[in-house]
Amino acid sequence: MIYLTRLNGEKIILNTDLIEFMEKTPDTVVTLTTGKKFVVREPVNEIVDNINWLKRKQFSTLKD
C-alpha cells in the first residue's frame, strides 16, 4: 500500500494491486480495477517510483 494525497489535502492509503492505470490530465487520475477513480497531487512518475520501491522491498525479504 502507498500513501497518496487528494487535491483537497486528504491523505489516502491505496492498495497498489488494485491500480488498473494512471493518467496525467493535468492532475493525476488513478483508476482502480473496481472502476473507482482518485485524483491525487502526486505525479505519475512519483507514484510509479513508490510502487517500484515497495515491490523491491517486499520481494527482497523473500528467502530461497
Image: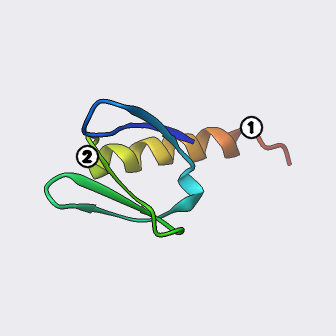
On residue 42, the disc is: none
Residue lying furthest left: 26
* Residue nearest the observer in this picture, 18 or 59: 18
Say above or below: 64 vs 22. Answer: above
* Residue nearest the observer in this picture, 58 or 26: 26
What amino acid is found at the position of numbered circle 2 in the picture? Answer: Pro
Q: Residue at x 16, y 61 (%)?
A: 25
* Residue nearest the observer in this picture, 53 or 40: 40
Label 2 close to label 1 by CB (< 8 Å)? no
Dot 1 lies on which element? loop
- Find the distance from the CA under tag 2 to the CA under tag 1: 28 Å
Which image quarter is the N terminus in? top right
Q: Give the quadrant of residue 23.
A: bottom left
The x, y position of residue 22, in whole percent, is: 34, 62
- Tell me which numbered mark, 2 or 1, is placed earlier along the sequence: 2
Q: Residue at x 30, y 57 (%)?
A: 29
On residue 61, the disc is: 1
Residue lying furthest right: 64
Q: Residue at x 69, y 46 (%)?
A: 59
Q: Which residue is mark 2?
A: 43
